[in-house]
Image (cartoon, rainbow, N blue to C red):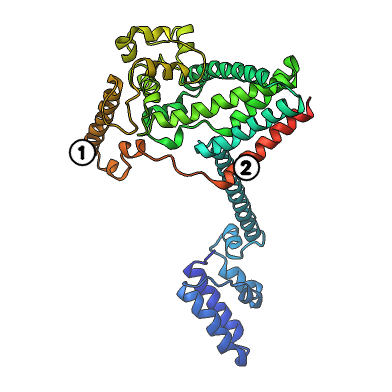
C-alpha cells in the first residue's frame, strides 16, 4: 500500500533528523529515502527508516493514523503469498479447463472420423474384404457347395433390403432426423451420402454372432456375404442417384428416390427396391410417375437389390437412355430442377435481406459438392477393423 503524503512527509523529516548524526551516510541515505516518498510515483517500503526512528518519533509520525492504516503501511508478510496462491489456483483452473476443452475437441474429432461418410473405394475395400473372407471360409474351409452358398447369399440380400427399409424409415427419419436432414437439405453434396463404415461393422459383428448361435458358422458367413453385396450396391447407387451419372437401368430407381426427396418424405423409403414399401404401406402408388404411366409396374415387386427397377426399365423400353443425357424421363427429374431453382431464388433473396449471408457459401454450391477422393490411411484402417471383426467371429465359434 502507498503511504499518504502527510505521513510520508513526517517520516521523511524524522528520517532526516535521525540521519543527521551520520554525516557520511546522511546525504546518500537521505536522497534515497526522500525523493521516492515525495514523488509518490514509485512504491518504496519505509521499513528501513522506521527501524532508525525512536519510539517518540514513531509515535508522533503515526499519531493521526489508526492501527489498521499502520498495518497497511507496513505490509503483512502473509498478504503477498496469499495473492500468489490465488493466482496459482486460478492458473490451475484455467489449465484444467484448457485440458478439458482439448479432450472434448479430441473426442468430437474422433466421433466425426467414426461417423465420416466414406468414399466408394473405401466401401468396396471394407465390405468386399469381409465378403471375400466369408466366401473363402464357406467354399474352402467348410466345403459348402456353390449352390448352397448362392442360396444363402440371396437370402442375405433379401435380409439386407429389409434392414435397409427399416433403417431408413425409423433410424434416419425418427431417431437421427437432425443428421439425416442435412442430406435432404443438400441432396447433391456427395460427401455426406455413403453410410459410415465403422458403425455398420459393429452392427454386422453382432448380427453375425447371433446368426452363428442359431444357424452355425457356415450359414452365418454365407448370409453375411449377401448382406455385404447389398450394402455395396446401396451405397454405390445412392451416390449415383444424386450425381449427374444417369444410366438407363438406374433411371427408374433414381426417380423413385427423388420422389422421396422432393415430393413426400413419408413414402418410398426403399432405396434399392420398392418391395418393402408395398408390404408396409408406404408405396407411392398414385403419385409416382412410373406407376401413373405404367400401371403394371406396381405389381413388379421383388425383394432383391435393384432387380425390380432394372426389369421395370427393360419392360418400359428405356434402354436407349444414355448416361448424362439432359432429357427428362420423369416428372421428378423436372421437380428436382425446380427445387434447385427454388433454392437458388431463396439464396438470392437472403443475399438482399442480410449482408452477412454473402460471406457464406451458397446452398447450390454445397449441393453439387463432388464425392472427393479415397484416403489410403482410412482404407487401411477399415481393413484393420474388418480383420478385428473376423477375428472376433473366429474366436467366438
The residue singled out by tag 1 in the image is: 352
Q: Give 73 or 287, whichever is nearer the viewer.
A: 287
Residue beneath the point at 73% across and 14% down: 214
Residue 292, percent from left and from top = 30, 10
Q: Nearer the viewer, mark 2 or mark 1?
A: 2
Local packing at callout 1 (Cα closer than 10 Å; few below 14, some 14-19, many 20+) is few
- Please state if 345 lies on the left or on the right of 386 as rendered: left
Residue 138, percent from left and from top = 71, 25
Give the alpha-carbon distance from disc 2 to disc 1, as whole Å.
47 Å
Residue 104, percent from left and from top = 58, 41
Residue beneath the point at 68% across and 28% down: 134
**CB atoms at circles 2 and 1 under 8 Å apart?**
no
Q: Is tag 2's residue or tag 1's residue first in the polypeptide sequence?
A: 1
Local packing at callout 2 (Cα closer than 10 Å; few below 14, some 14-19, many 20+) is some
Q: Give 136 or 344, whichever is nearer the viewer.
A: 136
Tell me which corner region of the image, top left, top right, bottom left or bottom right, holds residue 274: top left
| Residue 118 visible here | no
The total number of labels drawn is 2
Q: Secondary structure at mark 2?
A: helix
Quadrant of the frame with the N terminus = bottom right
User: Could you say which disc has been placed on residue 217 in the image?
Assistant: none
Q: Secondary structure at mark 1?
A: helix
Residue 21, percent from left and from top = 62, 88
Q: Give 47 or 177, whichever is nearer the viewer.
A: 177
Tell me which corner region of the image, top left, top right, bottom left or bottom right, holds residue 219: top right
The residue singled out by tag 2 in the image is: 381
Residue beneath the point at 32% across and 34% down: 324
| Residue 364 visible here | yes
- Please state if 225 lies on the left or on the right of 213 as rendered: left
Quadrant of the frame with the C terminus = top right
Amino acid at each position: 500500500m502507498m503511504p499518504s503524503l502527510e505521513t510520508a512527509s513526517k517520516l521523511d523529516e524524522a528520517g532526516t533528523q535521525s540521519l543527521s548524526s551520520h554525516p557520511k551516510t546522511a546525504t546518500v541515505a537521505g536522497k534515497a529515502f526522500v525523493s521516492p516518498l515525495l514523488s509518490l510515483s514509485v512504491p518504496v517500503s519505509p521499513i528501513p527508516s522506521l527501524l532508525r526512528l525512536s519510539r517518540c518519533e514513531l509515535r508522533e509520525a503515526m499519531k493521526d493514523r489508526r492501527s489498521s492504516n499502520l498495518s497497511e503501511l507496513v505490509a503483512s508478510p502473509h498478504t503477498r503469498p496469499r495473492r500468489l496462491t490465488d493466482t496459482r489456483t486460478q492458473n490451475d483452473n484455467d489449465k484444467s479447463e484448457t485440458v478439458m476443452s482439448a479432450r472434448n475437441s479430441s473426442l468430437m474429432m474422433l466421433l466425426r472420423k467414426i461417423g465420416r461418410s466414406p468414399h466408394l473405394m473405401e466401401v468396396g475395400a471394407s465390405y468386399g474384404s469381409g465378403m471375400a473372407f466369408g466366401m473363402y471360409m464357406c467354399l474352402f474351409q467348410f466345403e459348402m457347395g456353390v449352390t448352397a452358398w448362392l442360396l444363402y447369399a440371396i437370402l442375405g440380400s433379401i435380409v439386407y433390403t429389409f434392414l435397409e427399409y427399416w433403417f431408413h424409415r425409423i433410424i434416419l427419419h425418427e431417431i437421427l432426423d437432425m443428421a439425416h436432414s442435412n442430406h435432404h437439405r443438400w441432396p447433391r453434396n456427395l460427401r455426406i451420402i455413403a453410410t459410415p463404415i465403422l458403425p455398420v461393422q459393429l452392427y454386422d459383428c453382432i448380427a453375425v454372432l447371433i446368426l452363428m448361435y442359431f444357424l452355425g458358422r457356415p450359414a452365418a458367413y454365407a448370409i453375411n456375404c449377401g448382406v455385404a453385396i447389398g450394402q455395396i450396391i446401396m451405397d454405390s447407387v445412392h451416390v449415383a442417384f444424386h450425381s449427374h451419372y444417369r444410366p438407363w437401368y438406374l433411371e427408374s430407381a433414381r426417380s423413385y428416390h427423388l420422389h422421396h426427396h422432393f415430393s413426400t418424405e413419408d413414402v418410398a423409403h426403399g432405396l434399392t427396391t420398392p418391395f418393402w414399401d408395398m408390404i408396409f404401406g408406404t408405396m407411392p402408388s398414385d403419385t409416382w410417375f412410373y406407376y401413373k404411366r405404367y400401371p403394371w409396374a406396381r405389381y413388379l415387386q421383388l425383394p432383391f437389390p435393384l432387380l425390380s427397377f432394372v426389369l421395370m426399365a427393360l419392360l418400359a423400353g428405356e434402354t436407349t437412355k444414355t448416361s448424362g443425357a439432359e432429357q427428362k424421363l420423369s416428372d421428378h427429374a423436372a421437380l428436382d430442377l425446380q427445387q434447385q431453382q427454388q433454392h437458388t431464388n431463396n439464396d438470392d433473396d437472403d443475399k438482399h435481406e442480410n449482408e452477412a449471408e454473402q460471406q457464406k457459401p451458397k446452398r447450390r454450391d454445397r449441393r453439387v459438392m463432388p464425392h472427393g477422393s479415397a484416403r489410403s490411411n482410412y482404407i487401411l484402417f477399415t481393413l484393420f477393423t474388418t480383420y478385428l471383426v473376423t477375428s472376433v467371429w473366429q474366436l467366438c465359434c
